[in-house]
Amino acid sequence: MKRQLLDIMLKIRCAEEKIVEVYAKEQTMRTPTHLSIGQEAVAAGLGLALGKDDQVFAGHRCHAAYLAKGGDFNAFFAELCGRAGGVSGGRAGSAHLTDPSAHVYSSPILGAMVPVAVGAALSFKMDGKDNIAVAVFGDAAIEEGVFAESVNFAVTKKLSVLFLCENNLYSTHSPLSVRQPPSQIYERLRTPEFKTQKIDGNDAELVYTTLQKAVAEIRKSQMPQLVECLTYRFREHVGPLFDHDRGYRSKEEVERWMAQCPIKRFTEKLVKERTMTAQEIEALKAKYVKLADEAYAAALKSPWPQASTLMEKVY
């Protein structure tokens, strides 16, 4: 399990660091990118806790969820480069990663996929399936009216939904403290019928064990739960740069959180307990650096979508 967790986190980190490397310099990805660098533990723990047929519904910051759920590396880079071999044929770009084969669906509209996850869970119940639907969202989605409606419906109808909040403390440039009351998100949402909890979202092993237990409980009880994971994005809200010079957060704050990097913490723990050696970890990272390089190079050689298909899949 621990090796698998690290494997997924490094897959996500190396993929997104490749985006950072080429995004501004090469202008080959003409799509806004919302990176999860610094938040990988949440997606990795989720990907490992879910069953193959469980479904994930994510927002604009969806790379990590897609890759953690088994999304195709080559199709991922091809999509970001707008190529026909991409996840959505080059039509969707970074913030719309949707792949039924991986059971991942995404939309950049804030909170929009939360009710879709609830609808999926309703269909599971009507079909007699024990699948789970996961709504992955940030702290800002809590403020959308549809969020409260979705939780209310899921609890009332006893639906198998995991509401997974990646609380990175900011909505674009607005800190949580100026948008919501001082009480904790998970405490405000808790009711006798709706179990909620908050955990350290940068502790990969804790995220996995918590989500594994929550998934098992939801599957058994067919009642929704919420897990709030406190985490932090290192890069700007959208784009590959650091943004501590823009006035909404300080360099010192970013550096404090970078010191709590989930991959750094987890690899240090693995070495200390002798689960893996530093050399094994470096080899695993090198593997994903190479795979990311190869997937990006393959994407650039892939064909563009044909003009004759322009009006296909348009509703």
Image: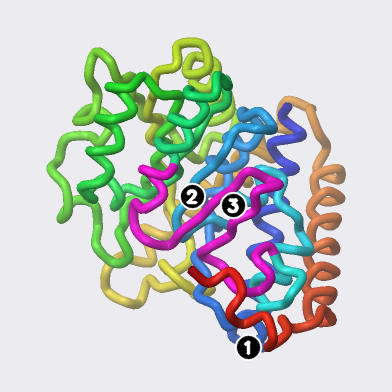
Q: Nearer the viewer, mark 2 or mark 3?
A: 2
Q: Nearer the viewer, residue 92 or 36?
A: 92
What is the quadrant of the N terminus in the image? top right
- Amino acid type, mark 2: Ala
Q: Nearer the viewer, residue 151 or 206?
A: 151
Contact check, label 2 and label 3, Cβ < 8 Å: no
Disc 3: CA contacts within 10 A as few (<14), some (14-19) or many (>=20): many
- Amino acid type, mark 3: Ala
Task: Confirm whether the magenta stretch covers residue 94.
Answer: yes
* C-alpha gap between disc 1 and disc 3: 22 Å
Q: Is residue 127 visible?
A: yes
* C-alpha gap between disc 2 and disc 3: 10 Å
- Amino acid type, mark 1: Gln
Contact check, label 2 and label 1, Cβ < 8 Å: no
Q: The magenta stretch spans which residues?
A: 87-116
For disc 2, the marked residue is 58
